[in-house]
Image (cartoon, rainbow, N blue to C red):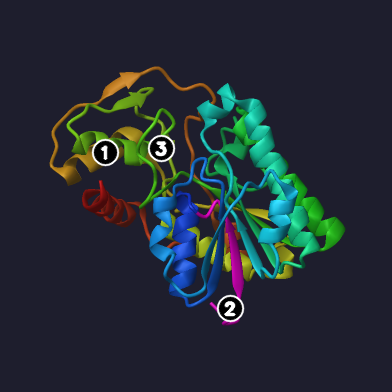
Amino acid sequence: MNFSEDSLFLVTGGAGFIGSNLCEAILDMGLRVRCLDNLSTGKIENVEMFAHRNGYEFTEGDVRDLDTCLKAAEDADYVLHQAAWGSVPRSIAMPLLYEEINIKGTLNMLEASRQKGVKTFVYASSSSVYGDSPTLPKTEGNEGKLLSPYALTKRVDEEYARLYSSLYGLKTVGLRYFNVFGKRQNPDGAYAAVIPRFIKQLMCGETPLINGDGRQSRDFTYVKNVVQANLLAALAPDEASGEAFNIACGGREYLIDVYYSIAKALGVEREPEFGPDRAGDIKHSNADIGKAARLLGYAPEYDFERGLIEAIQWYKENL
């Protein structure tokens, strides 16, 4: 990818799961990165290994504060905005907080990027914006009714980004992530994502709980595909500005099959427990990635199986 050698990336939420992987990839390219995080869900241990590397700086701060955003965006060429709170069930429990972080925080970063002359503002959206649409695969422009406050915040973010593109000429590119997994994803807590939770529980001799019957399907996407998408989006053509793109593998994995794949890889024979469906969850998710391929040049390098093997190996070495 042809970035100027003095390019500066601002990664918001840079101490989080996806953010830290982005910081690492940018540094590995020999480019500069400024990490902004308030450490509410991100962890300093996700980025402390970068502290000695040339071109890296860390700023502790909150995207809900406009002055913080303005300072962080100073001299930045590209903003990769990952700062947000995830989890559908947590958003149902805390809708006001999600409004503050996911909507106000994104608007602050859009405004800071506009004022500071950022070349491209890339931001994390979500497959949750498809809501109750039964259509598979999920295609941009064919969304249903939203099912959670989290989904609503991501839809609003997309609309603000579209306006900042059309009204102010800021190049904005939204990435609708589909069930991202990989190294540094937190396996702990009530709102942990399913793959790291399964891995840790099976490694620790616990019996994982599957919400529902296990026949729900997801387009699980390895984090290195997401990193690729962000970097491609930073160099997106003008015709991509104001648009949102599915970022996934384009496949479907049933949760029960994922469970058995992890158990087999770990050499564990244990049946899971089953519980009630989670409120706000969709039953099936599968992405059409054709638009991202056409306009961004996105072509995922990792299929589900390859990504899962690499992720499991990382947890074996780091848990």
Question: For the magenta stretch, what is the residue range?
Answer: 1-14
Query: Looking at the image, is 255 positioned above or below residue 45?
Result: above
Q: Tell me which residue sits at (49%, 41%) in the image.
A: 41
- Identity, as a three-letter code, of the amino acid under mark 3: Ala
Q: How far apart are marks 1 and 3 (CA)?
A: 11 Å
Q: What residue sits right under mark 3 in the picture?
A: 193
Tell me, yes or no, if residue 30 can be seen here: yes
Report the residue that reaches farthest toward the top: 276
Q: Which mark is residue 3?
A: 2
Q: Where is residue 127 in the image (x, y as percent from the top left)?
A: 56, 42
What is the crowding at mark 1: few (fewer than 14 residues within 10 Å), some, or many (at least 20)? some
- Identity, as a three-letter code, of the amino acid under mark 1: Lys
Magenta-highlighted stretch: main secondary structure?
loop
Magenta stretch encompasses residue 7: yes
Q: Tell me which residue sits at (60%, 28%) in the image.
A: 148
Magenta stretch encompasses residue 240: no
Q: How far apart are marks 1 and 2 (CA)?
A: 38 Å
1 or 2: tag closer to the N-terminus? 2
